[in-house]
Image: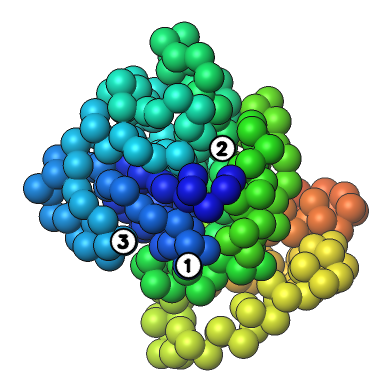
Amino acid sequence: MGEQQRTVALIGPGRAGTTIALGLMDQGWTVVGVGGRAPDAPSTATAAACLASRPALVSEVARGAALVLVATPDRAIEQVLLTAEPAIEPGALVVHLAGSRGLDVFAPLLERRTGVRVGALHPLQSFPSATIGLERLPGAWAAVAGDAAVAEIARSLGLRPFELADADRGRYHAAAVIASNHLVALLGQVERLAATCSVPFEAFAPLAIASVQNAFTLGPAEALTGPVARGDLATVEQHLRDLDPAERDAYRALAREAARLTGRRDTGLDRLLGDLRQQSGPSAE
């Protein structure tokens, strides 16, 4: 896009959209408007101030924008696009940031409009705040689809784009959820168990960080250590005895995944890690 076209409208004033818009501002883009639930909603006003822009109605926010970023909840994208459609400029590029949705989400918009370009850009990164998110953009990967300009925009932000087909979106997004949300939930279990034995949660940080680094350096199978990798059935059984029953389900589930990584079959371990819906605890096996 030429310098005269570096205008962007943001629909959805959350952390992800604000982070991407801030990154574009660093590249010389101007944010012409921010649309949210309402122009006077606190989230809309805050994002607009952060982006040196103005809050606007969704139905008007795209006016004058060469790029329209849609950063709303996934289920709301189609309706938001139809609301914004009257103000979308001819030839504008409309991009959503959702991980679970592909180009099919633009079908209702494209039925009404011709000449509008569309794409998807999903950064594989966590944005606890827009400021921290901006620091995390360079070097992160991003799933892209649609118009070729989407990959160019991703690269300008320091992202590493890769093409993702609509048919692969569900499995891709599930992997992203596991890598982020499920990993955090697992560390929540570590925190709970650490508290029961008066060990600081922070004590596990070097181990957890090194394990993740090993998995990406060596590959998960080679990085795996511990009792399941050793075939140490007695230790796994002792863990299940010592754990509160409410903690056993997660332990069993992840131990089964560890066993899958080993590539071995152990009928004793299989029985021990059997479905909790069929068993009341270790003593039932």
Q: Which residue is mark 2?
A: 120
For mark 1, give the secondary structure.
Answer: helix
Q: Which dot marks residue 192?
A: none
For mark 3, give the secondary structure.
Answer: loop
Q: Position of residue 166 (x, y in %)?
A: 65, 27
Mark 3 Cα within 10 Å, few/some/many (few <14, many 20+)? Answer: many
In the displayed orientation, state which residue is furthest to the top. 111
Q: Which residue is mark 1?
A: 26
Report the front residue among 60 and 180: 60
Q: Which residue is mark 3?
A: 51
Look at discs 1 and 2 and give the one toward the viewer.
1
| 267 horizontally vs 94: left or right | right
- Residue 187 seen in the current view: no
- What is the CA distance from the residue labelled 3 to the residue labelled 2? 22 Å
Q: Amino acid at mark 3?
A: Leu
Q: Position of residue 27 (x, y in %)?
A: 52, 63
- Residue 84 position (above or below residue 179): above
- What is the CA distance from the residue labelled 1 to the residue labelled 2? 21 Å
- Residue 191 seen in the current view: yes
Please tell me which residue is depicted at 39% across the width and 40% down the height of the picture.
Answer: 65
Look at discs 3 and 2 and give the one toward the viewer.
3
Q: Amino acid at mark 1?
A: Asp
Question: Quadrant location of residue 208?
Answer: bottom right
Quadrant holding the N terminus: top right
Q: Amino acid at mark 2?
A: Ala
Mark 1 Cα within 10 Å, few/some/many (few <14, many 20+)? Answer: few
In the displayed orientation, state which residue is furthest to the left. 40
Name the N-terminal-most of marks 3 and 1: 1
Report the front residue among 39 and 174: 39
Q: Position of residue 136 (x, y in %)?
A: 54, 70
